Image (cartoon, grey):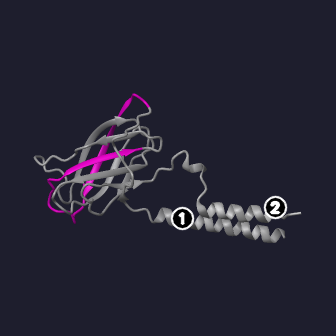
Amino acid sequence: MIKFVLFLFCFASVLTLSVSESKSASVQPHAAESFSVGYIQMKTAANCSYLVVISTSCSSPKFTTDKIGITFGDANGNQVYEPRLDDPISRTFEQCSSDTFQIDGACASPICYVYLYRSGAEEGWEPESVKIYGYNSEPITFDFNTSIPNGTWYGYNLCETPSSSYQLSPQKWFMSLVLGSVLSFWP
């Protein structure tokens, strides 16, 4: 009986590890579901300064006249929002180039999400990456290498919110149920 319980425990551990590894390896930029910058939560009154470097892909059009916005933040609800980064006069977001912006906002650390917003008639603007040098944390780079859809917040959310760390995934819940059932019959 002990061997069977140990087998189940090992099986559950392997299953959990393989599921979590496959999730982290397949992270790609995506459209934000139910994301709104209308509700910006700032935990402190202090503001911090960020250096944001957006590299435009060589696959992108020569330049864009579309309006480009950004928001990023941490798992605690601290959010930085800049509605318009573009400047057609200075020709930001040209093909094969990097543009650097200084953005002030809430003190977010560590930064775990970034979304870009594109609004305009031109198609195909393709950021290669977004690198954020932030407050009290290491710089973080988000690789895009894909065009941003029009009128949609598009990017990454790698945050593990404080409440989600206590929730069981369906696989873990099932394995806990099986293990609990087996152990309940233990003499």
Quadrant in which the N terminus appears: bottom right
Near mark 2 (Cα within 10 A), the count class, few <14, some 14-19 or many ≥20, is few
Q: Viewer-nearest of labels 1 and 2?
A: 2
Query: Could you tell me how far apart the alpha carbons at marks 1 and 2 are, in whole angstroms?
Result: 31 Å
Query: Looking at the picture, does residue 166 appear above or below residue 145?
Result: above
- Report x, y in % for residue 182: 78, 66
> Is 64 a magenta residue?
yes
Q: Residue pushed farthest left? A: 89
The part of the chain drawn in magenta is 44-73
Query: Which disc number belongs to residue 184?
Result: 2
Where residue 37 sits: x, y (%)? 34, 43
Image quadrant containing the C terminus: bottom right
Q: Secondary structure at mark 1?
A: helix
- The earlier-in-sequence mark between 1 and 2 is 1
Compared across the picture, whether 17 is left or right of 24 comes to right
114 is higher (above) or lower (below) than 14: above
Q: Residue furthest top?
A: 45
Q: Residue at x 44, y 33 (%)?
A: 43
**Going by the picture, which residue comes out furthest to the right?**
187
Instruction: Give the residue type that dot 2 points to.
Output: Ser
Name the side, left or right, on which 163 lies relative to 60.
Answer: right
The quadrant in which residue 176 appears is bottom right
* Residue where numbered disc 1 is placed: 21
Q: What count of labels does the image hold? A: 2
Q: Which quadrant would residue 51 be assigned to in this image? A: top left
